[in-house]
Image (tube, helix red, strand yellow):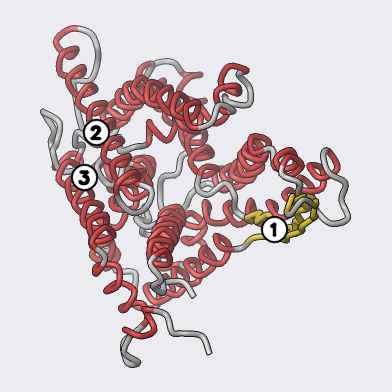
Amino acid sequence: MAAPTRAARSQPPSRPRLLQAVLDAFQQPDIRRKLLLTIGLLVVFRFVAHVPIPGVNRDLLELAFEDNAILGFLNLFSGGALRNLSVAALGVYPYITSSIIMQLMVPIVPSLQALSREGEQGRNRIQLYTHYLAVPMAVVQGYSQLVILQQAGAVSGIGFTGPEALPTLSAVISMTAGTMFLVWIGELITENGIGNGISLIIFGGIVAGLPTLFPSIVSQNVGLFSILAMVAIGIAVLASIVFVQEAQRRIPVQYAKSVFRSGRMYRQSGQSHIPLRVNSAGMIPLIFAFSIVIFPPVAAQFMVDQFPDAVLINNVGNFVIDWFSPQGSIVSPVFIGTIFLLVMVFTFFYTLVVFQQQNLAENLQKNGGFVPGIRPGRPTAEYIMRVLVRITWGGAIFLGLIAIMPYVLPYVVTGFRNVNTLTLTGTGLLIIVGVVLDTMRQLESQLMMRNYEGFIR
């Protein structure tokens, strides 16, 4: 009979397993230090998110966010800091953008591709380039958001000419510095805490906005039935996100190695698998799709404001704003369809780009591994690619439905036709579930290393 584990000996029968796992984590000094460091740095982030840049009118800012879904989406990825127009109003979004750009450039630029094959030193150099790229991205995005806020009537005096230059420059520099400070906090969490720091910062901003969700819904007078329907839909979406995030196709792999022992050569075999996730791209396709779709109405609004007397520009601009802008109680079907198609396209694009960088077939062949019934080398790569494309269809359709869910709900739940912006979108739920699962896995591995039971059975 096997001896009971340490957790089994110490856990009372009546105590819930999840609670016991939390207590076990805090009993370990190193895990407790990591948890407290993570919580402390997230508290620092929330303090920074409430430090406004100079010259902000809070009343006008609140009015601008009431009927503007574009600002609501940008606020989601800033971790809730854009609503306060704080020094952290950009959040870590410029860094995420630069990371995506670098990931796409690695297989295209030969020098970056060579760096990626140099092990940890090469990855550190690519990471350094990502930080360098994040600074100009933050400058451009900071000024763009100030222009959007000025068009929405939240701020005034934005420009780089005349007396407006110095206040605008100070605001952009403050927002850029806030972004890099949050990136530094995120990397501290990743290196010395629990979980992915960048994801936890976005997660902390979304969760911090939850207390304001319920009063805003009640104030719309949507009725008890509509609220219950929204709760039921939210639970169903949450369960489906967990299911798809954890779903994977396991391709069996066998390893055959030769071992020299006692003067003779022996062949040993082992079995493993390659886990191919249904949703390998995560939330990246949603960021790509919304970034592209949001640009045309923003540019059209800017042209209409700059040239109010030009009839052609006004007609084209108003057409783009009406059909491609996520504003109003009922969003245009053209906008919904465009978002759905772009999310699917970017899901395939990002998944295949990452797959090409991993070189799974080549690494299997080098380590003596093979897929049963498939020849090593190129046939293995083609087989894995076919399987990956088939399962990615499910992930792409699912992400597309998650992206359009906030805009389809007003058609389904009639009581919510007066709600202009759903605070907690499917994208927010996807981020929350992904971050929670990733953090729990890391804490699980820390507990299992010390012979404790974890959170996930």
Residue 28 location (% of width, % of height): 26, 65
> Residue 299's quadrant in the figure?
top left
Type of residue at label 2?
Phe
Are dots 1 and 2 in contact, CB under 8 Å? no
Q: Which residue is at the front of the view, 339 or 306?
A: 339
What's the residue type where badge 3 is placed?
Answer: Phe
User: Which comes before the other along the chain, label 2 or label 3?
Assistant: 3
Residue highlighted by disc 3: 45
Earlier sequence position, callout 1 versus callout 2: 2
| Drawn side of residue 112 relative to residue 234, left or right | right
Between tags 1 and 2, which lies in front?
1
- SS class, disc 1: strand
Image quarter of residue 63 = top left
Can residue 405 be seen in this snapshot? Answer: yes
Q: Residue furthest front?
A: 263
Task: Measure the alpha-carbon separation of dots 2 and 3.
Answer: 9 Å
How busy is the neighbourhood of tag 3: few (under 14 within 10 Å), some, or many (20 plus)?
Answer: many
Q: Residues within 10 Å of mark 1 (few under 14, many from 20)?
A: few
